[in-house]
Amino acid sequence: MIDLKSMNREELAAYFLELGEPAFRAKQVFSWLHRGATSFDDMSNLSKDLRRKLNENCYITAPTIARKQVSALDGTVKYLWQLRDGNCIETVLMRYHHGNTVCISSQVGCRMGCAFCASTIAGKVRDLTPSEMLDQVLFTSLDASEQISNIVLMGIGEPLDNFDNVLKFLELVNHPDGLNIGMRHISLSTCGVIPGIHRLAELRLQLTLSVSLHAPDSETRSRIMPVNRAYDVEQLFDACHRYFAATGRRISFEYAMIDGVNDHDWQADLIAKRIRGMPGHVNLIPLNDVVESPFKPSKRIAAFQKRLESHGITATVRRSLGGDIDASCGQLRRKAMEEKGGAHEILGNH
């Protein structure tokens, strides 16, 4: 069976020509899919014969809401979506004065193993398809009856570990006949998969690259982020400087503040030294408590921010949203797994 929603307009046109249909069918079907159609029978401007062919050979992805939590504090909405194979992923809708931002997942689970993150506890199950990433934006918007203006790929999974599918998703969500969300309104987060950063630099996309840094020295970073053993922090900053040289786009560095681990003044000084020569923004993140993790939130966020600013580095503290609805990424999925009797039951064999 063919996943039509993961196809771009050119691929759809080629497919319809194979079926003996005119190429303009691609625009019609693309429009239906990107408006949230869940059945070919709803596509009223297609012939009955074509709808029959599509029903026999293709499918339309459409997740169902397994759980939905709405914050009483700020209106943030957290969705647990169930996919057609039974796997579950998380999406978060955040409301700001400048518009609505949706945080999407790029994989079911994650294999990067960051010690402070709940998403990686059960490991990676599989990559998400372009349509499954698009669906998170589309069906969140439809459920909330609100337009989405910004996307952050900061949910479950490592986007650059699913590079080709993420790239196709970006093409689809950016298309003027679809959701038409501009690249400058999209942020992609990576824990430091350097080959992916180099590939992104070559494409010169106008999105915002966010690097999950969390420590500027290899000893600390390797302890909390296993990816640093493959691509150490010196290589990471070299890739970041190359990315800026190629794209001219400022990089955002995500930094979860961990008590006694990465919150020392000398580490702030080292961040400033490594960023020097390119514009960079450091986003300090109050750590979410994860039961399985020994790490605790830092008490030195304000002092660390002041130290960075003394070097001329722009540093902000991320506003905490949805503090009453399992705000830590991956927590909702984990709870659902436990309630269903473990990872194998809800997530399939892996």
Image (cartoon, rainbow, N blue to C red):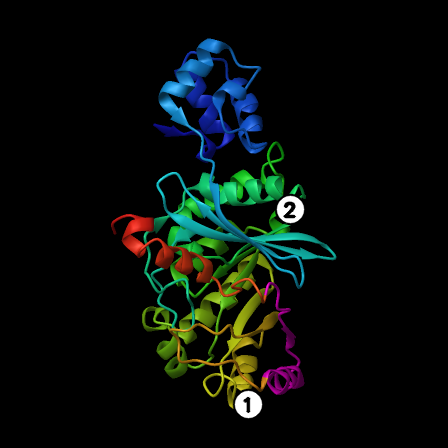
**Disc 1 element:** helix
Q: CA distance from mark 2 to mark 1?
A: 39 Å
Label 1 is placed on what type of residue? Asp
Query: For the point 43% across and 68% down, which residue is it?
Result: 117
Callout 2 crowding tier (Cα within 10 Å): few <14, some 14–19, many ≥20: many
Residue 310 in the image, given as x and y percentages of width and height:
66, 86
Decide which of 173, 237 is in the foreground and name it. Answer: 173
Query: For the point 59% across and 85% down, which residue is it?
Result: 304
Decide which of 258, 254 is in the foreground and name it. Answer: 258
Q: Which residues are magenta?
A: 301-322
Q: State whether residue 231 appears in this view.
A: no
Label 2 is placed on what type of residue? Ile
Decide which of 342, 225 is in the foreground and name it. Answer: 342
Q: Quadrant of the N terminus?
A: top left
**Disc 2 element:** loop
Instruction: Point out the tag, 2 or 1, that comes first from the N-terminus.
Output: 2
Query: For the point 36% across and 19% down, which residue is it?
Result: 56
Check the image and name the residue furthest to the left.
349
Q: Is residue 17 left or right of residue 178?
A: left
- The disc at residue 265 is 1
Decide which of 50, 235 is in the foreground and name it. Answer: 50
Residue 297 in the image, given as x and y percentages of width and height:
52, 80
> Where 88 sits versus 215, above or below?
above
Q: Are marks 2 and 1 in contact (CB under 8 Å)?
A: no
Residue 338 in the image, given as x and y percentages of width and height:
35, 59
Q: Report which residue position mark 2 lands on.
A: 148
- Front of the two marks 2 and 1: 2
Report if residue 102 lies within the magenta region: no
Q: State whether residue 136 appears in this view.
A: yes
Q: Is residue 81 left or right of residue 27?
A: left
